[in-house]
Amino acid sequence: MNVKSEATHCRSMFPWLATALIVAPTFVSAQVLETWQPPEASSLAGLFTEGHVSGDVRAFYYGAHNAFYNKGLNQNTINYGGGLTLQSASLYGISFGVSAYASRSLLHPSDTSRVDGSLGPSFTTLGEAYVQYRKSLFTATAGNQSFDVPFISPYDYRIAPQLFQGVLGRYGTKDNYIEAFRMFRWKSWTSDSFTDRTAYNSDFDGGSTIGMNGTPGFYGAGGAGKQSFGAYGVDGQAWYVNYMNYARMFYADGHVSLNEGVLQPYAGIQVAYENGGDSNLLGRIRSQVYGFQVGVKHNSLNVSLGYDYTRPDANAYQNGSLVTPYAHNMSSGPFFAQPFITSTQDLGAGRAYGLSISGKPVDNLTLGTQYSFMDLVSTPGAPSLNQSEYLVYVMYNFQGKLKGFSIVDFFAYQSSPAKPAKFFQNRLQLQYAWGQ
């Protein structure tokens, strides 16, 4: 790494970062915060006796027809398992947390091509293992931890979440904060140990071009802010991340909303810029993404229309696609226009559109539907993917004596004239959670 050029790049990016934090409002991909704050222990023993225990038990069924456009390939995958988390109380501002996860397969077919790889093999693993120091508005965390910024998130909708090994410093309140981080290693939701590899490596991506080449990790800084101005609200976030051996990324998004009245409209913008030299693992990286979103809320009903444009670049990785080492083939992150099954940034450059409708007809029940269209090209000169996806989903949280139980079901259908088959997938999750 050229230290001088890296420092120059950082200096040029942070004025943008500071400006975006002041003026850019955010609506999505907010920093995940702890739901339980450690109390001050009365003694050393109180670190344990006055702490907090939480956990969950989950079962998943993933069924697919013509899985990922492979004609005739049907998948039926069942996994069950769960996690247990212990968070200590705080003594002189110091606390710690540990978690463990177990996942087991059930009735998996012997033909591994008919198993959804995202549910992964059976494993038992230590998850989080961190020590934390908290004083007033400052928090420092070191060790194996859950970590969430745009395109780098826990993604815990499987048995175990993604976790990261490193250090994090944070200053501020829940809605207004800045933070800096340095992460060295990563553990995916299907792994039982931390690694210096990413989702672009061959043990995670069957079409990988970089084999098992590792990375020193990533570092960066950013933050978010939220303010109210009478009936209007604005909030925003901005981040700089250096994916070492891959690319440097700047991302910001924001929204302004009307928070009073029968109809509450909102509008937002987002921008991502990324670059990396030819010597990086994926070669030359040049990506520019611009997006906007408009929507309206009425009670629990939320209707939104999103658009993202990734500028094509024939001389860059995958025609100018955004490189996301910890979201590749997993999540579209905060993109306004995204499909459910696949990821916007993995499909190429061009235009992406999304329409989403969700609401709660009764307490504890959420119904939703989404349509996305991906006019994207991954290889210069190739025809557009022109992918349509239709999604419907339902979420129900039980109450009373069954409080803690929930059921979630997603059903998605994808089609593309560039693909040989229509793709259907159903994802069903049953969960019991406590102490959350």
Image: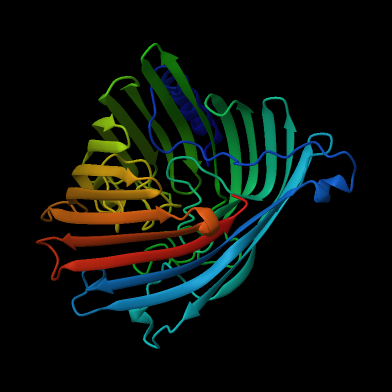
Q: Residue at x 35, y 35 (%)?
A: 272
Q: Which percent across, then down, holds residue 41?
A: 83, 39
**In this image, 206 relative to 266: left or right?**
right
> In the rendered view, would you say 211 is above or below 233?
below
Q: Residue at x 35, y 34 (%)?
A: 273
The answer to whether one can see residue 385 in this image is: no
> In the rendered view, would you say 176 is above or below 162?
above
Q: Which percent across, then down, holds residue 299?
A: 31, 32
Residue 361's image quarter?
top left
Residue 287's image quarter?
top left
Residue 140's image quarter?
top right
Q: Which percent across, then down, holds residue 324?
A: 40, 48
The answer to whether one can see residue 368 in this image is: yes
The mark total stands at 0
> In the rendered view, would you say 254 is above or below 23?
below
Q: Which percent across, then down, holds residue 401?
A: 54, 58
